[in-house]
Structure formats: C-alpha cells, structure tokens
Amino acid sequence: MHSTKNIFAKDYGILPNQSTDCTQAFYKMLTDHPENACFILDPGTYHFSSEEALRGDYYISNTDVENPRHLSILLKDMKNITIDGNGSLFLHKGQTIPFTVDHCDTVTLKNITIDWSIPLSAEGLIVDACKEWTDMKIDSDLFPHFIKENWLYFKGENWESPYGSFCQFDHTTKKVAYGTADLFQSSKQEQLEDGTIRFYGPFDPVPTPGNYGVLRHNRRLHPGIFLNQSSNLHLEHITIHNTGGLGILAQFCENLAFDHIRFEANRAAGRKVVSGHDDGLHLSNNRGEITVEHCSFYGLMDDPINVHGTTVKITEIVDTHTLKGIFVHYQAVGFDCWAEKGQTISFIDHLSMASRGTGTVNHFELLSPKEFIITFDAPVPNTFQVGDALENLTNSPSLICRNNYFGSCRARGVLVSTPKKVLIENNVFESAGSAILIAGDANFWYESGACSDVLIRGNHFADCCMTSMYQFCEGIISICPEIPKPELHKPFHRNIKITENTFQSFDYSVLYALSVQGLEFSHNRIIRSYVYEPMDRKHHMINLEYCSNVTLHDNHLIGDVLGQDVHTVGMEDSPILFK
C-alpha cells in the first residue's frame, strides 16, 4: 500500500481568481503525479476555455457524435487520485468537458462547483402570449442572441447555436408549469423594437405571462463530468450549474458513488431555473455497485437519474457461433468495449422482449462505429433471429438511491433498467412526469435491461408528479418497457416491491405496470391532493397489463382518492391477490 502525497496546485502556478486559463497547468500537474496523489486547490475561481482544452476522440453514450472532444481536465491511466477543490468554482468558456476520468482506478473528485460564463442553455421571461405568438424578454448579457433568417440563435465565445424549443416554468414555484411538457414548438421568431423576442406558434395551451421559458439549444456534445472505463470512483460535494450535454456521464465503469451532488441554477448570476442541458446522472453500461445519496436535482432539461445498458440489434447470423449487429441509436455507437471475452450476453426476442437464453463471449470487434461482429463459446440459440437483440448482463450494476431530493425537472425522476438489485428509498420526488420509470427497450432507444429485484420503499411522491406528460409517463410509478407483443407467460420484469411510500395524488394513475411477474404494492398511503386539476388521462388508480403474481394489500387511502380501483389488460388467467 503506497502512501498518498499532497500536491498543492499553487506550486504549479494554478492560482485562484486569476484571468489565466488553467488547462495546461492542470495537465502538467496531473501527468507529473499519475498515482497516489491528492491535489489540493486554494478556494476561489479557476478559468478554462475550449480553445485551450486538450483534444480526445470519445464515443459517449446518449451523446451526439463529434470528435475530437474538448477536455479541460483529463485524468487518464491514473490510480489512487483525489482532487479537492476546497469549494472552488471552475468556470468554463465554450464547448468543453470540465472533467474526464478515463481508464483510472480509485479516483475522488470533491468540493467543486462547475459553471459556464455564458451558459449553454438559455431562459427568458414570458411577457405576453396568445395562441398565435408568445413574447419573451431574454437578457442579452446573460444569454447573448441574435435573429438570422427568422430564427433565434444564441452565441458564446466561439460558438453559435439555433434555438430548438422552450419549456415553461412557474415563476412562483420554479417548477415545470402544470400541463405544459414539450408542447411549445415555434415556427419562426423575430425581434421586436423593444428587443423582445416573439415566438410564433400556434401554442396550445397558451403560455402564461410572468412564467419563465427555458430555451433549449446547442447539440448534446460535452457532459459536465465524463467517467469512462474506470473503477472505484467517488464524487462528493459537487455543484453543477450548467452543462453542454448530460450532467455526469459514466459508461463501462465499475463501482460508482455519488454523494451530495447538486444540480441547480446559478441564481447569483441572474439565472432563475435551468441547471442542465439534459440528464443529471446518466449511468450507462456500468457494473458493480452504484450509490446515489444526499443529492439534489433542480431545473434539469431531462431525467435526474438514468441507469441502463445498451441493447444491440442483430443484422446477420454468420454461423452457429457468430453474429453481426449494429448499434441502433445514433447517440450510442462506437463502443469498442460493449462486450469482452468471458462476459455473459442475453439473447432477446425483440417482439416479446423475452430472453431466449444466454451465451459467453469469445470475441467482440467493431467493424465500424455502428457495426460489430461477435463470437460465442457455444452455439447461438436456434430460435434467435435477425432483428432480435443482445444485452450484456455483465455490464449491469446494482443501484442504491436514497435520501435524495428530486426537484422539478423537465421530464421524469429516476429511470432504472438493470437486472441487478435496486433500492430506491427515502427520497422526495417532485418530478414533472413520472417519479420512477422502470423501462427496457430493444426497438427504439435500445436501453436495457430487465429488472429482477427492485424495492421502492419509504419515498414521498409530492403533488407535482405527473403534472406534465412525457414519454412513458403512465403513472407516478410507471413500469413501462417497450414490448410490441407482450405475453402473459413471458414477463419482462420480475420481483418489484413498492411499499411504505406516501403518494400525494391529484390525478388517477398512481401505478402503471406492464409485463411484471411478482409485483407487490403494499402499506402505501395515497392522499388526495387538490393542488392541480385532474388531467383525466387514465381513470384507474392502478393499471396492470400482462402481469402475474400481483399482490395488493394494506394500502391506506386518505380523502377522495380518484379511481380507487384496479384495471387489468391481458390478465384473465392471472388473478390479483388482495389481502
């Protein structure tokens, strides 16, 4: 066991509150001490720009492909490393990844705030609106912008980006406004004489004057923190005010711990609600144990937590042991480590999503960023067909998610798709869509996999869950795999227990479940809320489709809870046990 030495950043000329770019000095410091080092910064502000950034080619999960990437701080092939920012602000200019951890073992990042001088998402104040148009004041100092050919563009130090769409946040609560979701698309924009930007609709519903509009632009290119093919990583006391893509992206890593991570708008800089371009923690194709504790998520433009693998589509059966296939989604390609010798692969029927068996990898090789060839130790199941899918069961983590706060973000709360053990406990959810989504797919997003042991316990689901409609939001808890042809006796998910939770529900659907064997909903409190009007989407409290071995018992309804019933589809031979 080697002792860890303290390295002081100031000894490398990395000084706080200076105007100089710190990229090259950091690179020198880190390469001088690749192992057993704790890098300590003096508190203050440190500057980084994309122009000075390092360059590196990376295929990043759920992220647009554009190489080389810009890398501000790169930890590569390092071991037993800590970076302690002592509460410092790392302030960025342009498109860049603030931290990249690549092929490292035992790394801690702590006590750091990440932000941009010109944010990579924008917001404005809605001042007037009708069905035909919406007027918005956008601070040109905070969010520089211009109109070109009837379209709004935002600009930074060395970039410009066209507006895409806007999302509406309530000015009082700072939550996604009731009933808005992703409805605000604009046909063209113009700048009025007083500088106000007019967005032409039509808009239905009509945006509310006084609310904030979060304007999404920029491609999804650079996550805030990128963790790649590394192990034993610990991130603690990190605040992220803005990103150019996913917040923290971890792929093909083993054992991840996130403690006191906070996503929130930098209100001291004049911003009101938006904190991130997309997801908060996006955790793809990892293994070992993932823990997320004492974290807070506010104002993200996608899901706070998403844990999943990547399924791949088979295009050719070469011989009894060999398959050719492709990565399907355009933001998930080029993974040369998707499978490795000795790993376990599941053969998935893409229509029923049932497994046809498993195999052990002998060889995996990319033929291009999109196409690969894979060989197995034993013959492929003879029922496996072109168009079916593969899932890597080895690259599947367990998840502990507890004592977190899911403030209002644009989409859902926790998305989880993994066959390993999942615990979601003692969290508070104020998601605009479903609080928890248990998904699975081999037909569109190609995000695996089937859950087999999930405990959702002791959580509080607040009034605003399900106030806006997004993809797969069928209930406050939505178990919603994409299965073109579900079959009762081929369940996708198994052993999901939902117990001792409190739901404040203004609408009907508390639970939706598709293709689950072994589902328990027990000892929960469901309280009727009157904060919002019902949207009348599903008229049942519990909605079950193609589920078996379902147990509902000892749930306490308080007030005039809507529905108070169970609706089933495809379950005639699978009775529900009430006790």
Image (cartoon, rainbow, N blue to C red):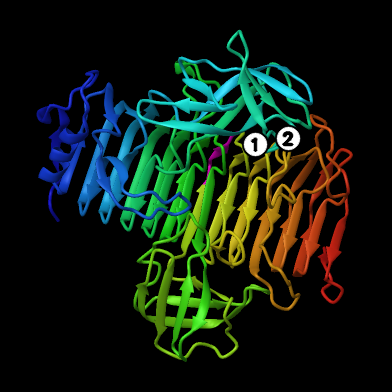
Number of numbered discs: 2
Q: Is residue 158 left or right of residue 280?
A: left
Q: Position of residue 489 (x, y in %)?
A: 73, 78
Label drawn at residue 430? 1
**Residue at x 26%, y 23% (from the top left corner):** 43
Question: Type of residue at label 2?
Answer: Asp
**Residue at x 64%, y 53% (from the top left corner):** 437
Residue ranking furthest to the top = 194
Q: Position of residue 251 (x, y in %)?
A: 40, 56
The quadrant in which the N terminus is found is bottom left
Q: Tell me if residue 571 comes above or below residue 101 in the rendering.
A: below
- Residue 298 visible in rendering: no
In the rendered structure, does residue 403 fall within the stretch colored magenta?
A: yes
Label drawn at residue 463? 2
The quadrant in which the C terminus is found is bottom right
- Is disc 1 surrounded by few (<14), some (14 to 19) or many (20+) residues within 10 Å? many
The magenta stretch is 402-407
Instruction: Specify the quadrant of the image occupied by residue 334.
Output: bottom left
Instruction: Specify the quadrant of the image occupied by residue 527.
Output: top right
SS at circle 1: loop
- Is disc 2 surrounded by few (<14), some (14 to 19) or many (20+) residues within 10 Å? many
How far apart marks 1 and 2 lie (CA) works out to 7 Å
Q: Are marks 1 and 2 in contact (CB under 8 Å)?
A: yes
The residue nearer to you, when weighing 574 against 65, is: 65
Question: Type of residue at label 1?
Answer: Glu
Label drawn at residue 285? none
